[in-house]
Image: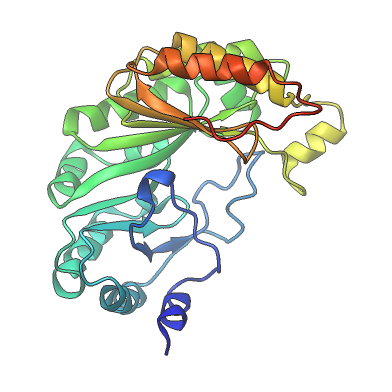
Amino acid sequence: MTREELYASIYTHDTIYQPPWEEGVPALEVALGCSWHKCLFCDFAKDPFQIHALDKIEHNMKILGQLRPDAERLFLLGENAFAISSDILCRIFDMTDKYMPHVYEFSMYARIDDVLRKTDEELQMLHKMGLSMLHIGVESGSDPILALMNKGITSSQTVSALNRLDRIGIDYCVTVILGLGGRTYRNLHAIETARMLNRTHPKNIWCLKLKVWEHTPLEKMVKRGEFDPMTPEEILLEERILLENLHVTGCSYVDSTVLDTYTIQGDLPEQKESMLRAINNLLAFNWGKTTPTVIR
């Protein structure tokens, strides 16, 4: 088999979704689907939730180890792979000693309730074995918006879970979906999300723009007139409010919200003002005639 065929053999789907901070990190598929799978906006998790059998994981790790023999970090692939029990995660971590011996740290997607279900002792054990980063979609810090979108968590649960990770020393990246509250909650979304994140210590904040996907419950809400999506300019205004009210430290901020053709990124708090200037410059564009390019 060719190298490309070997890669293709260990993944269920052709496209692999990894956060920008995991670019270039080998991904080992350990699960499919989302254990919650009820968020009204989501088109991401199309597969029923399932955890792969350990023998399949071991087989694929053996192939991945041949393809990436010098890898030092491993991303466990799955919409929320941290739903896997601590015992099974430890067994997966242990497998690297045989097949990927240079790996010393692990990362994966997680939901807030995945963190809450694990005890402090479990989190400490996983951290000791190499768990260094969780990528968590918090989406919003506003309880009315979280309830509207059927996220299945509250802002207080988010703060509790992230504070536990802070105490144990596990880094985390949080995803925020701008526009998630629509026009009804646009100011509330930005202010309460900033207020929630200010009580935590994220390593990274990744802002995405809400997309109304076909065949989702959110699309039906839009068609019924129950949800009013925001324009690109309104989302930028919302992002400006979010950034103005963020007071986190030691955090990398990346925005890929309004157009696929640009991004705003920087370190907080050092580059906060330059990012706000970039947003103001974007707001000055004639959106009907001009397309912004990459801004860094």
| Residue 51 drawn above or below residue 190 | below
Q: Position of residue 224 (x, y in %)?
A: 87, 31
Quick check: 87 above or below 200?
below
Residue 207 lies, in percent from the top left, at: 51, 31
Q: Position of residue 57 (x, y in %)?
A: 33, 72
Residue at 23% x, 37% y is 170
Image quarter for residue 177?
top right
Tell me, yes or no, if residue 142 can be seen here: no
Residue at the spot 65% in from the left edge and 49% down from the top edge: 43
Locate residue 220 relative to residue 163 in the image: left or right. right
| For residue 289, side relative to residue 242 (left or right) | right
Along the horizontal axis of the image, is 134 left or right of 220?
left
Nearer the observer, 256 or 278: 278
Residue 119: quarter of image: top left
Residue positioned 36% across, 12% down in the render: 247
Residue 41 percent across, percent down from the top left: 66, 39
Quadrant housing the N terminus: bottom left
Name the residue furthest bottom.
1
Please say if 234 is above or below 23: above
